[in-house]
Amino acid sequence: MSVTVHTDLGDIKIEVFCEATPRAAENFLALCASGYYDGCLWHRNIKDFMVQTGDPTGKGKGGASIYTDGKDGKFFDDEIRTTLKHNARGIVSMANSGPNTNGSQWFITYSKQPHLDAKYTVFAKVIDGWDTLDELEKLPVDAKHRPTKEVRIRSVTVHANPIAEAQLLAA
């Protein structure tokens, strides 16, 4: 399963780990398919660490998962897997504000980040678009690690969605 994230700087193709992290995968794919991420800023960018997006407000404090109940239930639980680690450039994880607070925000690592293991749900990895990831990392940022030039996700192409296909077959 893969998606292509079309950004102002180019495309990034991401392989999603649907079997290993089914709730995170379902959340990410549903938000991608619905256009939720279209127009989202890459709002946090730390060289040699990671770049973050997925907040429709653009401020880094918003966003909700598909599992929302309209009240406090905008988050879903972590899916920490010992086999999925922040062990390379291009690891894609859910951003959170503590245990079991996964919403819509996610990040891509620029390098190995083992201190993030067992704290953030790894649900995908970059498989193409390394030049775009390089360009994101080069962006100048302010003191709060916000890019000084706005760079957005234009759209996301979902290449195949096995979770949606399985739901259609079950119906």
Image (spheres, rainbow, N blue to C red):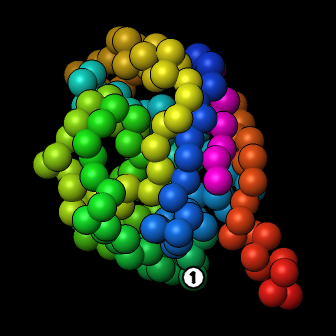
Up/down of 15 relative to 8, above or below: below
Q: Is residue 106 left or right of residue 112?
A: right
On screen, residue 115 versus residue 98, left or right, reads: left
Is 55 included in the stretch rendered in magenta?
Answer: no
* Relative vertical location of residue 2 with respect to residue 63 in this rendering, above or below: above
- Give the farthest residue toward the left: 115
**Dot 1 surroundings within 10 Å: few (below 14), some, or many (20 or more)?**
few
Residue 5, picture quadrant: top right
Is residue 129 visible in the rendered image? The answer is yes
Q: Read off the residue under disc 1.
A: 69
Q: In the image, is residue 2 part of the stretch drawn in magenta?
A: yes
Q: For the residue labelled by badge 1, is the local secondary structure a helix, a strand or a loop?
A: loop
Q: Residue placed farthest to the bottom in the image?
A: 171
Foreground residue, 157 or 87?
Answer: 87
Q: Give the residue drawn at x 51%, y 58%.
A: 17
Which range is magenta? 1-8
- In the image, taking residue 34 as reference, residue 148 lies left or right, namely left
Q: Is residue 3 left or right of residue 167?
A: left
Where residue 91 appears, as percent x and y from the top left, is 38, 42
Q: Residue 46 versus residue 123: which sits nearer the camera?
A: 123
Q: Position of residue 122 (x, y in %)?
A: 37, 56
Residue at 38% across / 76% down in the picture?
Answer: 77
Q: In the rendered image of this protein, does residue 120 appear above or below residue 52?
A: below
Residue 97 visible? The answer is no
What's under tag 1, amino acid-wise?
Answer: Asp
Residue 35, compared with residue 4, is above or below; it is below
Q: Report the number of numbered marks.
A: 1
Q: What is the x, y in percent for residue 148?
A: 41, 15
Residue located at (70% from left, 40% from top): 156
Identify which residue is drawn at 64% across, 47% down: 2
